[in-house]
Image (cartoon, rainbow, N blue to C red):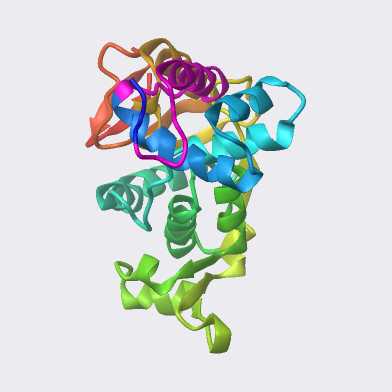
Amino acid sequence: MQLSKREYELSEREFEIIRDLVMSKTGIVINSNKRELIYSRLSKRIRTLGLAGFGQYIQLLDGGNNRDEMVAFVNAITTNLTAFFREGHHFDYLRSKAIPELKRHNAGSRKIRVWSAGCSTGEEPYSLAMTFADELGFETWDWKILATDIDTDVLATANSRVYSEERVTGINSDKLHKWFRRGTGRNQGMVQVSKRLNEHIAFRQLNLIQPWPIKTKFDIIFCRNVVIYFDLPTQKRIFEGYAEHLTDDGLLFIGHSESLFKVTDRFESIGNTVYRKR
């Protein structure tokens, strides 16, 4: 079956090839009900490149020597849905339990390391940074956040620190005044996150299904609404990797639609989608 009345045709075989390529490059499982999404996102690339259709685009990707387009392909496919202080109960848990516990446990080193995996356009790591800055300040504690994503476009947005005012409507006025600067003139309608927060975050490109060049042990890992796009064997490998990269008793925060049940036994539940390494 082929799409009709469209700028390009996407045959069943072409869809299968793209689906397999997405799986091999990102680990994301694309079901048949995502056909419209695939068409919508990749037709823009085909139009931009001046190609005749999906067949030519697949040939371009299959050439193996067009790294830039493979990056654009991955960026087009990956979904980036996020918000500041999304799933607010996690940040409540940080303030009320996790950070006070870390202050006691890490009193000697006064060092805390956090990983935001699948950080998208940066709202999650900046929310983490605001929380740690409010609770610990900048002078007496050494806290840093690694923020990773497979999509280089969203990482560039995150590192720019610039967002539309609509993106921060849910943040209370005290935090807005403290951590954001409103744009003026041609930047009206935009806000910029404090550079001081950005200095405590390292934004890096990382594909979770490939080897991780990370040696750090983290006290906390946030990986929310990311693994739902992976099949079960990939989920098992990722959570095993998180367990290896967490300190003893380190914490893992996952998304509201996710579960570790029958996926891994390396963690125990201690809260609403909050887990501690066993």
In which image quadrant can residue 159 be found? bottom right
Question: In this orientation, which residue lies closer to the viewer: 120 or 43?
Answer: 43
Q: Quadrant of the C terminus?
A: top left
Pinpoint residue 80: horizontal percent, then vertical percent.
43, 45
* Residue 157 left/right relative to 215: left
Q: Quadrant of the N terminus?
A: top left
Q: Is residue 60 magenta-colored?
A: no
Question: In this orientation, which residue lies closer to the viewer: 65 or 186?
Answer: 65
Asked if 245 appears above or below 99 in the picture, the reply is: above
Determine the residue located farthest toward the left in the rendered image: 272
Determine the residue located farthest toward the right in the rendered image: 65
Q: Determine if residue 75 is in view.
A: yes
Residue under the point 22% across and 37% down: 272
Pinpoint residue 10: horizontal percent, then vertical percent.
44, 27
* Residue 183 left/right relative to 59: left
- The span shown in magenta is 5-32
Residue under the point 35% across and 48% down: 94
Determine the residue located farthest toward the bottom in the rendered image: 185
Asked if 179 appears above or below 57 in the picture, the reply is: below
Residue under the point 39% across and 43% down: 101
